[in-house]
Image (cartoon, rainbow, N blue to C red):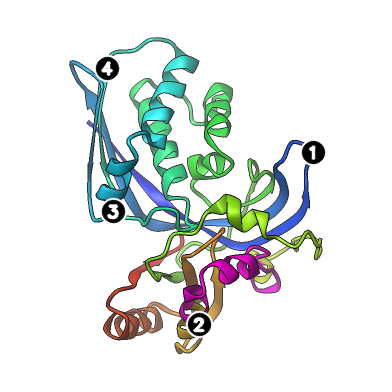
């Protein structure tokens, strides 16, 4: 049995530069990952099967098809026939929430199958498989801090963020990525910065925050509540929303904020964690 953690993804900064001729958007983003996420296990079986457990299992079960089974099939097509496998996904991250849950699950599936078959994680076909599954899947395959460009698939790893305490909060609303991008105003507000990664994040922005907030006003409240907490270094929405995050000066401040938010907003999803 092989176990992988499908770590939650954060966009500490997300600059949308322009819409490309292929319909995608040219992005510059600072990816970061936290220590927590969904859990995924793979083991040999008599026939392919997938089981989904966890607090957000029902949403995926209702969808039928999901990125885990697609990742299995893409991997199989890339590397040849292999025996059937049983996959168990412990779905702990909210769906359609801007933290790469589905992309992280797909990437964890690729990593688990690659480990089983002794395939290097930098194998060109594995990278191509990740890119075929979605714009965020290559970053989630890497699962470490990086500057992303292009659709987000061109990655330059960056050091200096590990251990920073982070609090993730989602108000319980789903936001369509396509709809959010469709509401982007088309204005290029400039490139992402260079140098110290935390400095890049602090000087950056999320160009999808305004359109997401227009679609889901609950994001306004989450950002305001996070900004009220003591010891924050950065408060921002991740990806296309609706999950927002705060980075903290120390773990004690993060713990205090998490307790306060859970008490005041018991219906919000709240994850106290740290960057890796």
Look at discs 2 and 1 and give the one toward the viewer: 1
Secondary structure of residue under mark 1: loop
Q: Find disc 3 in the rendering and name its residue.
A: 56
Q: Which of marks 3 and 1 is nearer the N terminus?
A: 1
| Residue that label 2 marks | 232
Magenta span includes 59: no
Mark 2 or 3 closer to N-term? 3
**In the image, is 151 to the left or to the right of 132?**
right
Disc nearer the start of the sequence (2/1): 1
Q: In this view, does 230 lie to the left or right of 259?
A: right
Structural crowding at the residue carrying mark 2, measured as other residues with C-alpha within 10 Å and reported as few (<14), some (14–19) or many (≥20): many
Judge whether residue 218 can be spotted in this image.
yes
Is 210 magenta? The answer is yes
Instruction: Provide the residue designation for mark 1.
Output: 21
Q: Which of marks 4 and 3 is in front?
A: 3
What residue is rendered at 48% in x and 89% in y?
Answer: 228
Q: Which of marks 4 and 3 is nearer the N terminus?
A: 3
Q: Mark 3: few, some, or many residues within 10 Å (few <14, many ≥20)?
A: some
């Amino acid at each position: 049995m092989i176990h992988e953690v499908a770590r939650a993804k954060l966009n500490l900064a997300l600059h949308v530069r322009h819409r490309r001729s292929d319909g995608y958007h040219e992005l510059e983003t600072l990816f970061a990952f936290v220590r927590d996420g969904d859990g995924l296990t793979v083991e040999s079986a008599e026939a392919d099967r997938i089981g989904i457990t966890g607090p957000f299992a029902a949403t995926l079960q209702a969808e039928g098809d999901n990125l885990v089974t697609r990742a299995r099939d893409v991997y199989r097509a890339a590397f040849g026939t292999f025996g059937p496998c049983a996959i168990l996904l412990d779905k702990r991250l909210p769906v359609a929430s801007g933290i790469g849950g589905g992309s992280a699950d797909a990437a964890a599936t690729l990593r688990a199958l690659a480990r089983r078959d002794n395939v290097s994680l930098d194998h060109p076909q594995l990278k191509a498989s990740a890119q075929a599954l979605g714009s965020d899947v290559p970053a989630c395959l890497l699962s470490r801090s990086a500057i992303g460009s292009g659709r987000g698939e061109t990655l330059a790893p960056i050091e200096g963020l590990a251990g920073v305490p982070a609090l993730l909060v989602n108000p319980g609303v789903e936001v369509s990525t396509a709809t959010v991008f469709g509401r982007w105003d088309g204005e290029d507000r400039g490139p992402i910065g260079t140098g110290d990664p935390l400095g890049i994040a602090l000087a950056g922005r999320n160009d999808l925050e305004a359109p997401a907030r227009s679609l889901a006003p609950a994001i306004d409240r989450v950002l305001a509540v996070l900004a009220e907490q003591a010891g924050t270094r950065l408060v921002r929405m991740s990806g296309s929303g609706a999950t927002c995050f705060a980075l903290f000066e120390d773990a004690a401040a993060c713990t205090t904020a998490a307790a306060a938010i859970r008490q005041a907003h018991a219906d919000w999803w709240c994850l106290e964690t740290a960057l890796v």
